[in-house]
Image: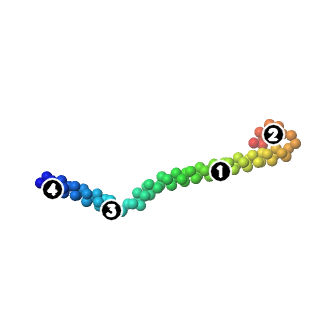
């Protein structure tokens, strides 16, 4: 009698596990939860990269402007360069 009860219990557990694995509801939510951190990381890395590129362009532009202003003068002192900056 004890064997039959254990067999029924194992069969019941197996049946519930089988239903659990064959149920497809919520798969989209699980996939979204797995992909979302990766998407957020990619978004923030893109934002940081664009800000770094923008800063690099600004520094390059400032360097060109200072060089242009310095070459227009006949003599340049350190105070003149500091005033330009």
Q: In which quarter of the image is the C terminus?
A: top right
Judge depth for marks 2 and 4 and give the one in front.
4
**What's the mark number on residue 53?**
1
Q: Residue at x 58, y 53 (%)?
A: 46
Callout 2 secondary element: helix
Label 1 crowding class (10 Å Cα cut-off): few <14, some 14-19, many 20+?
few
Q: Position of residue 48 (x, y in %)?
A: 59, 49
Give the image location of residue 51, x and y in percent: 62, 50
- Give me the disc on residue 80: 2
Q: Name the residue under label 3.
A: 22
Mark closer to the observer (4, 3): 4
- Secondary structure at badge 4 equals helix
Q: Do the residues labelled 1 and 3 touch (CB within 8 Å)?
A: no
Q: Are marks 1 and 4 in contact (CB under 8 Å)?
A: no
Q: Distance between the residues labelled 3 and 2?
A: 77 Å
Identify the residue under disc 4.
4
Q: Residue at x 32, y 59 (%)?
A: 21
Q: The N terminus lies in which quarter of the figure?
A: bottom left
Depth check, mark 1 against mark 2: the one in front is 1
- Local secondary structure at mark 1: helix
At x 69%, y 50%, the residue is 57
Q: Is residue 10 left or right of residue 26?
A: left
Q: Quick one: label 3, few (<14), some, or many (20+) residues within 10 Å?
A: few
Q: In this view, does 24 lie to the left or right of 54?
A: left
Q: Which badge, 2 or 4, is on the more N-terminal residue?
A: 4
Image spot of residue 24 (x, y percent): 36, 62
User: Which mark sits nearer the N-terminus, 1 or 3?
Assistant: 3
SS class of the residue under badge 3?
helix
Q: Residue 58 vs residue 69: left or right?
A: left
The answer to whether the residue labelled 3 contacts the one labelled 2, judged by CB atoms less than 8 Å apart, is no
């Amino acid at each position: 009698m004890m064997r039959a009860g254990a067999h029924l219990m194992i069969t019941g557990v197996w049946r519930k596990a089988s239903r659990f694995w064959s149920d497809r509801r919520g798969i989209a939510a699980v996939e979204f939860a797995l992909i979302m951190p990766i998407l957020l990381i990619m978004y923030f890395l893109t934002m940081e990269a664009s800000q770094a590129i923008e800063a690099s362009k600004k520094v390059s532009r400032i360097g060109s402007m200072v060089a242009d202003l310095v070459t227009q003068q006949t003599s340049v002192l350190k105070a003149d360069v500091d005033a330009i900056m």
